[in-house]
Amino acid sequence: MLFCSRSHRSRCNQWRCVRIATANYQINEEIRDKEVRVIGADGAQLGIMSSAAALEIAEGKDLDLVKIAPGSNPPVCKIMDYGKYRFEQAKREKEARKNQHVIEVKEIRMSPGIGENDFNTKLKNGQKFLQGGDRLKVTIRFRGREMAHTNIGEQLLRDFAAKCADIANLDKQPKLEGRNMSMFLSPKPQNTNNKK
């Protein structure tokens, strides 16, 4: 959609045309309703008038007439600097996206016969993920005859959870599904602030 703004027309004596990808408002000459309720740039109600008269008022102030509530009877239009409004709206959306945090689920896999050093390395990595604000899935895979000793795997998971207790909550107790036993840990609220 091509949007031509009257803003700053006095300075440059020409229309400036801006392509707006997400424009879903009717603007200026696009508004063809017989009567519209008009709100001024300062938020004051200007009353019900023809769209031509409302457009004339907007032109007189070097602003745009924007239909903000097409479903009303009569439709509501506001006099504003539409280019500035779209810029501020895009800025707010960008700020909101920047502040939102996407929580990922990281996974750590171990075997029931894991050595102490390997276990400590996996534990350190898991604590790093939790401090970064991510959820953690810890999985133990049983192979062959190891299925007869699932209690060893469960004890490993419980030790892992106990060593992370100061920074994480246990969301899901160790549970055997097929040949895998897994549990979920989530970071305690004070630790989620570390991730930017």
Image: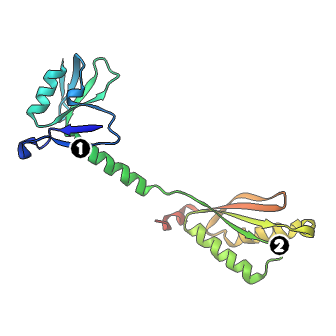
Quadrant in which residue 157 is drawn = bottom right
Q: Of the numbered discs in the image, which one, if any, rests on residue 18?
A: 1
**Where on the picture, by quarter, is residue 44?**
top left
Q: Residue at x 56, y 58 (%)?
A: 103
The residue closer to the viewer here, 114 or 127, is: 114
Q: Which residue is depicted at the point 11% across and 27% down?
A: 56
Q: What element carries label 1?
A: strand
- Residue depicted at x 76% and y 61%: 182
Q: Residues within 10 Å of mark 2 (few under 14, many from 20)?
A: many
Residue 97 screen position, x and y as percent: 42, 53
Q: Relative to 13, is 16 on the left or the right?
A: right
Which three-letter amino acid code belongs to the residue tagged 2?
Pro
Vertical side of 11 occupied by 119: above or below: below
Residue 74 image position (x, y, % from top left): 28, 18
* Residue for badge 2: 112
Nearer to us: label 2 or label 1: 1
Viewport quadrant of the N terminus:
top left
Camera-side residue: 163 or 153?
Answer: 153
Q: In this view, does 154 lie to the left or right of 93?
A: right
